[in-house]
């Protein structure tokens, strides 16, 4: 069985399409846990309505604790052998679960990953399936042009998660998926990635990675996330540590653009971004992960 954990907070306008796409799966041995994370709109009511329509859907109502807390609640209550975490404002192809499971089983993998659509555009164009060791997968994981650090395009083993007491970090408000995936992949031997796009990711709701939204405390927590990721490799793998710090530098450069785009006035925020961009500029400039135009920006 696959446990699908969909965490809902004030998503009444979007969640029906997502849930319907999950019910339409060609793979039938699944359960859907809808975690209502203290919604103040009609999301909680909609969750209950869906729970009444299909006995494979379970609804959990909890106080608002953030996405990491809600996903951890799903992990705690999962009955499946595998688990995945789609977002309620997105939707999936009908063979989303079937293909992810097949990729995993055909390649004897500890983690299977699929490609995704973003604003009607396929983000992953390399059509070849890749089977990787953990170190190769970790280097690619930190590259935003490939399968990325999201939790919604990866099929995890519940046993691996529980045996290692692996949970989403509730201290993090942004990029917590990436932090979780780095820790999970470190426990794997084989990772299989098929770039076929099975997941439809929406930018319309203004996620933390988009320039459309200002630098909220949640967005700014990405600085802490990347520092935590780099810390996982400290004294163990200097190259991966440098890649993580390179990613932190890139985030700070991107956020500086957001800062000026939204004409923000917080000197404290700007100082944090500048300090980290300068501190890790050397790693960034020497990192093959990022394009030359980013390096040119960092050298200005």
Image (cartoon, rainbow, N blue to C red):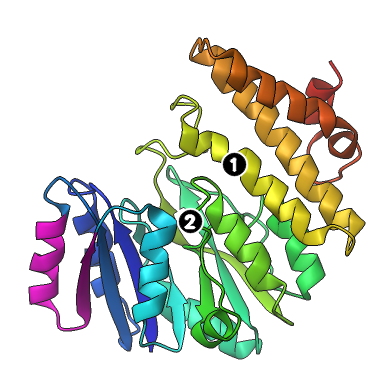
Q: Can residue 95 be seen here?
A: no
Picture residue at 14% right of the left edge, 45% below the top: 41
Q: Position of residue 213 (x, y in %)?
A: 43, 27
Front position in the image: 161 or 134: 161
Query: Which residues, given as a range, are shown in magenta?
Result: 44-62
Contact (Cβ within 8 Å) of mark 1 with mark 2: no
Q: Is residue 210 shown above or below 95?
A: above
Label 1 packing within 10 angstroms: few (<14), some (14-19), many (20+): many
Q: Nearer the viewer, residue 34 or 93?
A: 34
Of residue 84 and residue 200, the one placed in the foreground of this image is: 84
Residue 96 is covered by the magenta coloring: no
In this rendering, the label closer to the viewer, 1 or 2: 2
Lower sequence index among marks 1 and 2: 2
Q: Position of residue 78 (x, y in %)?
A: 37, 82
Q: How many marks?
A: 2
Image-based side of 137 in relation to 78, left or right:
right
Is residue 226 visible from the viewing direction of this image?
yes
Query: In x, y percent, where is residue 240?
Result: 83, 56
Which residue is rendered at x = 8% and y = 66% of the image?
49
- As helix, strand or loop, the secondary structure at mark 1 comes to helix
Please give left or right for residue 26 compared with residue 58 in the image: right
Asked which secondary structure carries label 2, the reply is loop
Residue linked to disc 2: 170
Q: CA distance from mark 1 to mark 2?
A: 13 Å
In the rendered image, which residue does mark 1 sit on? 222
């Amino acid at each position: 069985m696959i446990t699908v954990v969909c965490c809902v907070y004030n998503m009444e306008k979007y969640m029906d399409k997502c849930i319907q796409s999950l019910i339409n799966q060609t793979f039938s041995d699944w359960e859907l846990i809808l975690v209502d994370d203290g919604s103040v709109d009609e999301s909680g009511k909609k969750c209950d309505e869906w729970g009444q329509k299909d006995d494979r859907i379970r609804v959990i109502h909890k106080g608002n604790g953030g996405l990491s807390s809600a996903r951890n609640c799903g992990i705690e209550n999962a009955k499946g052998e595998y688990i995945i975490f789609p977002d309620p404002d997105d939707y999936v192809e009908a063979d989303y679960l079937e293909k992810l499971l097949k990729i995993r089983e055909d390649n004897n993998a500890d983690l299977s990953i699929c490609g995704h659509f973003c604003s009607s555009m396929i983000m992953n164009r390399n059509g070849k399936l890749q089977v990787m060791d953990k170190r190769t997968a970790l280097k690619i994981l930190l590259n935003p042009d490939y399968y990325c650090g999201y939790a919604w395009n990866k099929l995890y083993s519940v046993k691996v998660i529980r045996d290692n007491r692996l949970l989403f970090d509730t201290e993090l408000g942004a990029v917590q998926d990436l932090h979780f995936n780095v820790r999970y992949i470190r426990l794997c031997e084989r990772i299989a990635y098929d770039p076929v796009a099975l997941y439809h990711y929406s930018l319309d709701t203004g996620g933390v990675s988009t320039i459309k939204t200002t630098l909220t405390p949640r967005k700014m927590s990405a600085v802490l996330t990347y520092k935590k990721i780099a810390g996982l490799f400290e004294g163990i793998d200097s190259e991966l540590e440098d890649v993580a710090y390179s990613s932190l530098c890139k985030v700070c450069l991107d956020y500086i653009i957001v800062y000026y785009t939204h004409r923000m006035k917080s000197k404290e925020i700007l100082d944090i971004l500048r300090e980290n961009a300068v501190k890790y500029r050397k790693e960034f400039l020497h990192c093959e992960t990022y394009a030359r135009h980013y390096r040119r920006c960092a050298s200005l």
